[in-house]
Amino acid sequence: MGDKFYITTPIYYINDKAHIGHAYATIVADTLARWRRQKGEDVLFLTGVDENSQKTVDAAEKAGEEIVAYTDRMAKEWESLWEKIHISNTDFIRTTEDRHIKTVQDFWERLRAADDIYLGKYEGLYCKGCEEFKKEEDLVDGLCPIHKTEPELVSEENYFFRLSKYQKQLLEFYEANENFVAPANRFQEVKSFVEAGLEDISFSREKRDWGIPVPNDPHQVIYVWADALVNYISAVGIEGWEEHPADIHAVGKEILRFHAVIWPAMLMSAGLPLPGQIIASGFLTVNGVKISKSLGNAVDPLDLVARYGIDALRYFLLREVPFGQDGDFSEEKMKERYNSDLANGLGNFAARVLALAEKENLASGALDDEFEKKIAAMKIAAEKKTGEFKFNEALMAVWDALAFGDRYVNEKKIWVITDDAARRKALFNLVSLLDNIAAALLPFLPEASKKITDAIRWEGKALRAKKIEVLFPRIK
Ligand code: MSP
């Protein structure tokens, strides 16, 4: 086994089923997990669900279900969604599992031992949707800008976490780790936020019967974020984390502060190592409109997969949305990209090359210079761009090589070359190119990549190709 690589998605709230925005967040992490695995690394890829939220209680009530039955059902639904779309996670965590509850309580004790937990009085505006206290200046017309709801005034006795103590240490850490947050503009926002000064934060809620109890205080449960963030440790254990903390936490931009400010401070307090990098994706809209239950515009990823396939969904999201920016999903645009880039592009090229090559005995030999160069350039670009999370540009580099291959087929008119050696040489070039394209696509389009790679076989010095089923049937 190669080096270890540990990547996580956020854990999802289970008050509702998943929509395309959630699928996007998970697909980004899955792409990176597959990329690292392809390099021979020993990948731990964690996803899961965040159950100890007041939202869970409300949703169960609304569904008329007993809470444990509700959480079991929903957790299963989320887990099986990722299975159905072939997400390659190696673990799935629920925050109601013993391994998590125990880790959260141990973690809490570490913060307390560091004198970073104290009892105080809290009064503030709480947004249930965000599970977060808001300041007046965070609100727009008195409403949470994300949930468009009025936060409730909460006044209770809470345990606080001494976040303010870590301002200097955080800034020093950011200074020393210039890639801690990507993209860079988001890192700038994080730094400015911390530079402006940090206040201690409420870390527990009073008199709740759903959540993880504060050790030695049955009247309080641990604040859901103070519980949820620790999931990244629960999956590997405190010792496992000390040995190898997460390399990447993939998150959405609205939860970046929790991951890039509060979480590192919690780890500093607990005397544990910090994650390598936090990468923040933007938000997806559907036809230009924010995804919301009340608007009923929540596109179901399973529905899209049933009609277009897993790779098509991945391709659209990774190709269309520059990482870090907000993006828009529309079925019109998805269809367009599907037909032009996948059906006419990749699918057609693979089908043509493999059909032409099937009848031939291709011996290995040197590639033509231009192919050699094209393949090398594609590999370098795809590798570099993926490392910078510029998935769209990595894909563009592959499609550039594809277009080159397409032109070559058309210009050479392989099917009319009568000279056996010349025809075989041309086909050897093309099959090699296709083989390399498939390899470059493995992290992005795992299904198509495998089908192509399976159709190309090296037998000693001979290269055998066989026809494949249509990869991406055209859609009207
Ligand atoms: N439970 C917290 C995360 C805790 S992590 C320790 C949470 N859950 S969430 O279900 O609300 O969101 C999970 C992820 O989905 C976030 O990264 C969020 O950005 C992402 N998305 C939710 N809606 C989205 C879009 N419309 N578009 C893109 N990503 C979206 O926050």
Image (tube, rainbow, N blue to C red):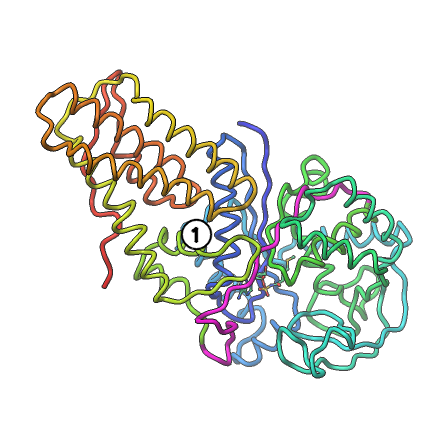
Quarter of the rendered structure image containing ligand 1: bottom right
Magenta portion: prevailing SS class: loop
Per the rendered image, the range of residues in magenta is 271-296
Place residue 186 in its image quadrant: bottom right
Amino acid type at circle 1 is Arg
Tag 1 secondary structure: helix
Q: Residue at x 77, y 48 (%)?
A: 267
Q: Is residue 362 above or below residue 14?
A: above
Q: Position of residue 209 (x, y in %)?
A: 71, 72
Is 423 colored magenta in this rendering?
Answer: no
Q: Left or right: 57 with respect to 224?
A: left
Place residue 440 in its image quadrant: top left
Q: Position of residue 163 (x, y in %)?
A: 84, 57
Q: Quadrant of the C terminus?
A: bottom left
Q: Position of residue 371 (x, y in %)?
A: 32, 27
Look at mark 1 in the image and give the residue it sits on: 319
Q: Left or right: 270 with respect to 474?
A: right
Q: Left or right: 446 with respect to 183?
A: left
Is 276 colored magenta in this rendering?
Answer: yes
Q: Residue at x 42, y 44 (%)?
A: 395
Camera-nearest residue between 248 and 364: 364
- CB of residue at label 1: within 8 Å of ligand 1? no
How crowded pointer 1 is (Cα within 10 Å; few <14, some 14-19, many 20+) is rated as some
Q: Is residue 444 above or below residue 85?
A: above
